[in-house]
Amino acid sequence: MDLAEVWVSLGNTARAESLARSITHLDEQDAALTAVAAAVAVRDPGRAYSIASTVTDPSWRALAIAQLAAVEDRPEQAADLVKQAGEIARSIDNPDLQSTTLTQIAATLANSHPGAAENIVREAARPVVHDPVFSQIAKALAVRDPDRAEAIASAAVGMEWQAIGLAGVAAVVAKSDSKKAASLISRAESIARGINSRFGLEFTLAEMATEIAGVAPDRAEDLACEITDPSRLATALGAVAAKVASSGAGRGVSIAALADCVAMWIFDADERAAVSLRLAEVLANLDPGRSCSLLERAERAAERVWDQSNVLSDLAAVVVSTDPQRAEALADKIQDPYHQAKAFARLAAGTADADVSLALGFVAKAEKVARSVASYQREQELAKIASAIAVADPDWAETVAGSVASFDNRALALTRVAAVIAAADPNRAERLVMQADKLASFVADSDDRAMAVMDVAGEMAASDPERAVAFAFTLADNFWRARALARVAAVDSRRAVSLAARAEKIARSVPDPDRRAWALMDIAGAFAVRDLDRAVAVASSEDDPYWRALALSKVAEVAGASHPDRAAGLANRAVAVTHSIRYPDVREECLVEVLAALAASDRARADKYARSLDGHLQDRALSNVAISAASKDAAWAREVAGDILDRELRALTLAKMAVVVPAESVKGLLASALQVGMWQSCIMEVIRVDRLTASEIGIEYAYLAGLRPRVPQ
């Protein structure tokens, strides 16, 4: 739950709406207003409708109105809202977005209006995405029409969701017809056995076990125990235990204890922490002692996790009902302010019903952190404004950059201004970079300082490579030092091999395997500038298939212009390596990045892979494909970019394409990018290809931000 929704739960709708409207990112604002409208709907449907009607994006507005329909008790009004939501969704020009929106509306209406949901979901043009919705609709209909419910569950395209849907129907039917329920479970199990993919089978077994646990606990436990992966097995047993316990059966504790034993065999710290948390929630009321032990295990595991934000937030949310002070201390440990604000909002939501004063305290902390996030984002926006106006007015640009409060963002702003003016005024550029250098040394957070120094080194490399190298060596952490040297090597082609060799030697000493692999990936790309064989050798040296695939794809991207045939082979090899990644979510994340290299040689195949992904992963994949293919076929790439649903990413993609396309296509792409209305996301690319336009944008937004150039005395 976000902060705006928390204010609704505390009865302050005006504050919730004001907070949502203060969000500058358009997609995030629409999402927040949609959430506020849904939260307000039960107590004030008129106000909720007014809020929903102001959502600008038609996809979010359709979803907002569908959520109102789902809680509307009056049949005529509900039917009218369903009709409105469908009409708005059908008005969306982009076929993929229209299909996705219709599916989301159907999912929202599945429990309250299953008939309407079925009609809507059948309109959408992406059958595989419909399957979970068919399962929802089937369960909603099972109480009054079991035969119809069975038919709808069977309409799913994928065998996984056919089996899951039938198991869900069986769980509902069991209360009135145990014989039919047993038949449905047997049929679902038979379908599941026909699934060829091991992951698909285990996913299906876990979902089926959870569905039937309340009515057939023995069979549910047997299905779960067929899962071989310890993480998925422990998670499935935990879900079965929770369902068994909620149904009143006494076996929940023993099943959860078995899940706990399985969890001991999970060696990945992230997974172990996540599973321990889920089991702790299940056992909170059944076995408090074991639950506390699991929470302690999750907290210990969190200390070994690369990004602790999500684990600490989840852990705090679990313990807040019994130990709010501990929950607050856990949230205080979160380093990233964005995630910390989210964590405190979750704590406020978790305590709103039991202790309003405590919830308000958490809200105050969440808002304080959120204001710091907003301030930081404004500073980054000022850095972009400064870089844009530097083309026309370097004095004003320097003043704007100097007005940024935080050292890291001021260093970034000064560095960007220096990069823009380096050719015209190298002395001033050097002075600004030296100022940025001094500021970077005062940044308290080691990673923030390292990023600032690495950015400065990269910007300096073209004009003063010796100083850039010296700058890189100011970094004490070998991970960042190696990456900074690789950044310089990629720019300084004359010394690329020697600098990359120095970076490799440093990177090999990094103890953390993921950080070492990350640095070596950058170094492989630097080698590819002048020594492709050495680049391939470095990329191939990584044992982890995730990092090996990324490194090979980076080498392929760099080598594409000079060695197209070898680059194509390396891209195909990188794709093949992704198939060996064990976990599907990691495999898909890796594939998204690898597709940039593949698109340079086989855009049709890359496009097909990209469209097989869902949600934001598909958007990112399409972005990579479009940018990579733009230099060879700008029109085709533009069509691909047009299918990106995230507006900010679409703008950035179009602007990045403008950097690589022929001159005659630049203006049109920049115009399309800026029409999206998110200049902040693409201004750096605009500067690279059209300085006059960039300067006009920068000056316009500087005035809007209340900034004025100095008037000579």
Image (cartoon, rainbow, N blue to C red):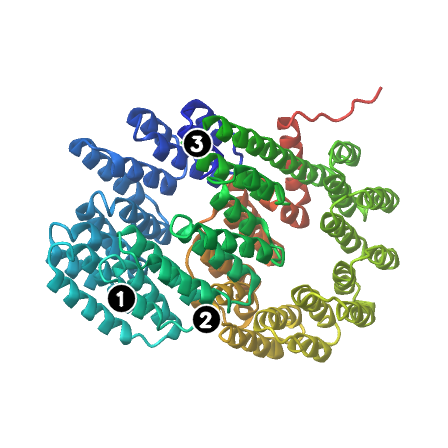
Q: Position of residue 656 (x, y in %)?
A: 59, 53
Instruction: Identify which residue, 33 or 41, lies in the foreground.
Output: 41
Asked if residue 607 shows in the view, the reply is no
Give the crowd class for mark 2: few <14, some 14-19, many >=20 residues within 10 Å. few
Query: SS at mark 1?
Result: helix
Give the crowd class for mark 3: few <14, some 14-19, many >=20 residues within 10 Å. many
Q: Quadrant of residue 223?
A: bottom left
Is 39 displayed left or right of 219 in the figure? right
Q: Which residue is mark 3?
A: 352
Q: Which residue is mark 2?
A: 605
Q: Position of residue 676 (x, y in %)?
A: 50, 42
Q: Residue at x 27, y 48 (%)?
A: 106
Q: Position of residue 652 (x, y in %)?
A: 56, 49
Query: SS at mark 2?
Result: helix
Q: Quadrant of the C terminus?
A: top right
Is 109 displayed left or right of 629 in the figure? left
Q: Position of residue 55 (x, y in %)?
A: 40, 34
Amino acid under label 1? Asp
Distance of label 1 from label 2 (alpha carbons): 46 Å
Give the crowd class for mark 1: few <14, some 14-19, many >=20 residues within 10 Å. some
Instruction: Identify which residue, 528 or 216, lies in the foreground.
Output: 216
Say which of marks 1 and 3 sits in front: 1
Query: SS at mark 3?
Result: loop
Name the N-terminal-most of marks 1 and 2. 1
Q: Residue at x 22, y 39 (%)?
A: 83
Instruction: Identify which residue, 279 or 710, lies in the foreground.
Output: 279
Q: With respect to residue 256, does 361 lie above or below? A: above
Say which of marks 2 and 3 sits in front: 3
Amino acid under label 2? Arg
Whether tag 1 and tag 2 are in contact, CB under 8 A, the answer is no
Q: Residue at x 76, y 55 (%)?
A: 458
Specify the label residue 218 is tagged with. 1
